[in-house]
Image: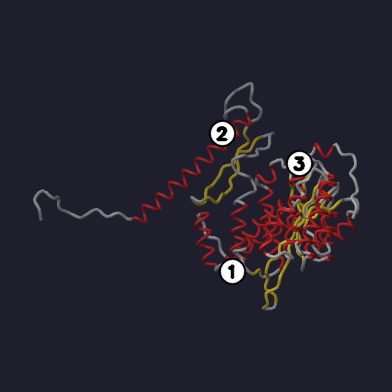
C-alpha cells in the first residue's frame, strides 16, 4: 500500500436509498408548491392575505378540505381553501379532474388494445407515480364510457347553418370473424362562426338505415337552423337529409367527386382531367361554372372518356351548391376537407387498437377523441365570419 493513502473502509452509496429520498424530496416540493399556489389564489379572491385587515377585503377563509392528487412525482395531499361566501374555483387545479383527458384516453386505448395488466400497471406508475390495478382500469373505463355517452347525447344548443357529415370504417371482431363497423360523425359551424362536434353514432354500414337514424337523433337533440349540409354522396345519406331537413341544401364534396371521375380515367390522363375539373370550381359564379363544365364534358368526349364525361354531366351541379352562399365561405364549404382532417386524426388514434372487441368500444374511442379535439384550439378558435351569411335573408333553391 502506498504511503500517505488513508486506511479504512471505502465509502459505499446506497443508490436505491438515494433515489427514494430524492423522489420524496421532489414529491414534497410539488406538494408545497401547489398548496402555496392555492393559498395565493385564495388571497387574491379574498382581496387580502390571511388575517390581514384591509378595506378592500371581499371575503374571509373558512378553513380548508383535503384531497389527493396523482402527479408524476407521486401522490400529493392538497389543502384546498374554503371561503365563507365566494365559491373557490381554482384555476391551478380543476376540482373534478384527477387525470388529464389525454391520459384517460391513453388508458382506454391500452385496455382496448389488449395490453397485459402488468404492463398497464407499469405504464400508469410511470405516468402518475402510482400503480393502477386491473379492477381500477375496468372501473375507470366504465366511468369514462358513461361520461362520453353523456357528452355524446347532450342537447344541441343554438343554430348551425353549416353541418359536415362523414363516416369512418373500423374493424371489429365478431364470432371469431373480422367485420366492419361504421362510426358516423357530424360537426357544425354555429351562428358565431365556431365549430362544434354535434354527434357520433355506430352504424353497421353507411346506408340509409344508418344515416337516417343518425340524422334523426341529431334532429331530436335539437339541431336546427341548418342551411347547408356538406358531405360525400354516401348511399342513403342524401335521401335521409331530404326526409328530416327538406329546407336545407346539400353540397357534394368536390374532392370526392373528382375521385369518382378519376375511377374512369386512365392514370396517364388523371393530371390533365384534374386540371379541367378544378377549372370548373375556379369560376366566378354558378353560371360560369356550369358553362365551363359543359366545355369539359365535350372535351372528355373528344378524349374518348365517355364514362367520365357522363359522371361529370350527372353530378357536377351537386358540387356547385356552395355558389349560392357568401363567397368568403366558398373555400370552407366547397369540400368536406375540414371533416377529413378530423377523420385522419381519429384514424391515427384508432390504428393502435387494430380490431375492436365490439362496435361500442369503437364508438367510445372515436367519441373520446372527438371530445378531446373539441376541447382544444379546434373548438375555441373562430372558424368563419358568419356576418356575411346573416345578411342573406333567403337563399336561392338550386335546380336538381
Q: Residue at x 21, y 54 (%)?
A: 10
Q: Position of residue 400 (x, y in %)?
A: 90, 55
- How far is mark 3 from mark 1, CA to CA? 41 Å
* Outermost left residue: 3
Q: Which residue is mark 3?
A: 193
Q: Quadrant of the N terminus?
A: bottom left
- Disc 2 is placed on an element classified as helix
Q: Is residue 31 left or right of residue 62?
A: left
Q: Is residue 78 left or right of residue 230?
A: left
Residue 40: mark: 2
What colouring does the structure picture have? secondary structure
Q: Position of residue 128 (x, y in %)?
A: 53, 54
Around disc 2, counting alpha carbons within 10 Å, would you say few (fewer than 14), some (14 to 19), or many (20 or more)? Answer: some
Q: Is residue 136 above or below residue 322?
A: below
- How far is mark 3 from mark 2, CA to CA? 37 Å
Q: Which residue is mark 1?
A: 114
Amino acid at each position: 500500500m502506498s504511503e500517505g493513502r488513508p486506511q479504512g473502509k471505502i465509502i459505499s452509496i446506497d443508490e436505491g436509498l438515494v433515489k427514494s429520498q430524492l423522489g420524496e424530496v421532489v414529491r414534497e416540493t410539488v406538494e408545497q408548491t401547489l398548496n402555496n399556489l392555492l393559498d395565493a389564489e385564495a388571497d387574491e379572491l379574498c382581496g387580502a392575505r390571511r388575517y390581514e385587515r384591509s378595506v378592500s377585503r371581499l371575503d374571509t377563509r373558512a378553513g380548508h378540505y383535503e384531497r389527493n392528487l396523482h402527479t408524476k412525482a407521486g401522490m400529493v395531499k392538497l389543502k384546498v381553501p374554503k371561503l365563507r361566501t365566494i365559491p373557490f374555483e381554482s384555476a391551478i387545479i380543476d376540482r373534478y379532474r384527477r387525470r388529464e383527458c389525454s391520459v384517460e384516453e391513453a388508458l382506454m386505448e391500452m385496455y382496448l388494445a389488449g395490453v397485459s395488466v402488468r404492463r398497464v400497471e407499469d405504464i400508469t406508475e410511470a405516468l402518475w407515480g402510482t400503480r393502477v390495478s386491473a379492477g381500477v382500469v375496468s372501473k375507470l373505463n366504465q366511468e369514462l364510457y358513461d361520461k362520453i355517452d353523456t357528452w355524446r347525447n347532450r342537447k344541441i344548443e343554438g343554430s348551425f347553418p353549416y353541418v359536415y357529415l362523414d363516416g369512418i370504417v373500423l374493424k371489429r371482431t365478431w364470432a371469431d370473424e373480422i367485420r366492419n363497423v361504421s362510426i358516423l360523425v357530424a360537426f357544425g359551424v354555429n351562428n358565431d362562426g365556431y365549430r362544434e362536434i354535434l354527434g357520433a353514432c355506430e352504424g353497421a354500414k353507411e346506408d340509409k338505415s344508418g344515416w337516417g337514424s343518425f340524422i334523426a337523433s341529431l334532429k331530436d337533440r335539437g339541431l336546427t337552423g341548418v342551411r347547408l349540409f356538406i358531405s360525400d354522396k354516401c348511399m342513403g345519406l342524401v335521401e335521409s337529409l331530404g326526409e328530416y331537413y327538406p329546407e336545407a341544401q346539400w353540397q357534394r364534396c368536390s374532392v370526392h367527386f373528382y375521385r369518382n371521375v378519376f375511377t374512369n380515367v386512365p392514370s396517364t390522363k388523371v393530371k390533365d382531367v384534374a386540371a379541367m375539373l378544378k377549372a370548373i370550381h375556379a369560376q366566378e359564379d354558378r353560371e360560369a361554372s356550369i358553362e365551363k363544365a359543359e366545355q369539359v364534358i365535350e372535351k372528355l368526349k373528344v378524349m374518348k372518356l365517355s364514362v367520365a364525361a357522363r359522371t361529370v354531366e350527372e353530378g357536377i351541379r351537386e358540387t356547385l351548391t356552395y355558389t349560392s352562399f357568401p363567397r368568403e365561405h366558398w373555400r370552407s364549404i366547397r369540400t368536406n376537407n375540414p371533416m377529413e382532417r378530423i377523420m385522419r386524426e381519429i384514424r391515427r388514434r384508432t390504428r393502435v387498437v387494430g380490431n375492436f372487441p365490439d362496435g361500442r368500444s369503437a364508438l367510445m374511442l372515436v367519441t373520446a377523441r372527438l371530445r378531446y379535439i373539441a376541447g382544444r384550439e379546434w373548438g375555441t378558435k373562430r372558424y368563419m365570419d358568419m356576418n356575411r351569411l346573416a345578411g342573406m335573408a333567403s337563399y336561392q333553391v338550386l335546380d336538381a
